[in-house]
Amino acid sequence: MCRMTIVTRDEFLVLLLLDQRGVRVSKMTMTPGDNETPEDVVVLTGEHNGLDWKVVATWGTRSDPVEGRELMTMLHGFEGTKRVIGSGFGGPALYPGQLVHEWRGRTDQLPYFVMARADPTVDRIVAVTDRGTEVELSLSAVVPQFGLRFAAAGLPTGEAPNRLIIEVNGQSVADLHRPMH
């Protein structure tokens, strides 16, 4: 049984700091931060190699031919208070028949990140790098405003994304092979 508790932004930040030990981070906040609008929802947060990151989702105004509206999903990375990453993707929440809509990329010399929107049935996403390293993405709970789960992870320095393994009920159901090189 899932229990929800409303917390203040300060309480959220304390919970976030306490939850940096593990792979899975599933906290979210409805309170917009600096440069965010009230429609923006922070759906996932984490830390990678000293870089704090968050994933922000919002329905965009541009019409998408598949869904009639666009879901924007952005990754923001910070070194201290300075934002050093600001990338993401838009489009339909999920394309018809797909369990995951994903993005892979990097900024300057920073490590690659992998980010995804996932069907609520997805319970695990693993990125496999070009060197064979497996990295489990942090996966949010289902975010009610979007009816989706969100996932993200930073990859080891010097390694690029190669494949994504998608699991439902503990079973691999998709292996998305899309090398970056």
Image (cartoon, helix red, strand yellow):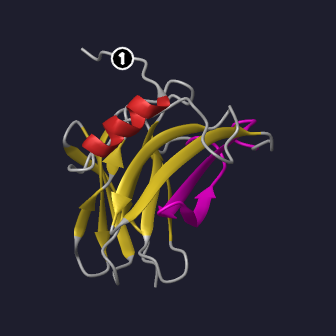
Front residue of 170/31: it is: 31
Magenta stretch: helix, strand or loop mostly:
strand
Front residue of 155/22: it is: 22
Q: Which residue lies furthest to the right in this view?
A: 62
Q: Where is residue 167 in the image (x, y as percent from the top left)?
A: 27, 46
Residue under numbered circle 1: 4
Identified at 26% across, 81% down, the residue is 131
Classify 76 as above or below 132. Answer: above
Secondary element type, mark 1: loop
Asked if residue 33 is among those painted magenta in the image, a careful observer would answer: no
Amino acid under label 1?
A: Met
Quadrant of residue 179 within the rendered picture: bottom left
Can residue 136 be seen here? yes
Q: How many marks?
A: 1
Quadrant of residue 159 within the rendered picture: bottom left
Asked if residue 85 is among those painted magenta in the image, a careful observer would answer: yes
The answer to whether residue 179 is left or right of residue 69 is left
Identified at 37% across, 52% down, the residue is 46
Classify 99 as above or below 84. Answer: above
Q: Residues within 10 Å of mark 1 (few under 14, many from 20)?
A: few
Quadrant of residue 99 within the rendered picture: top left
Q: Position of residue 152 (x, y in %)?
A: 40, 54
Identified at 54% across, 56% down, the residue is 75
Q: Where is residue 104 in the image (x, y as percent from the top left)?
A: 49, 66
Front residue of 109/162: it is: 109
Q: Please identify the quadrant where the N terminus is shown.
A: top left
Q: Position of residue 41 (x, y in %)?
A: 57, 36
Residues in magenta?
65-94
Can residue 26 be seen here? no
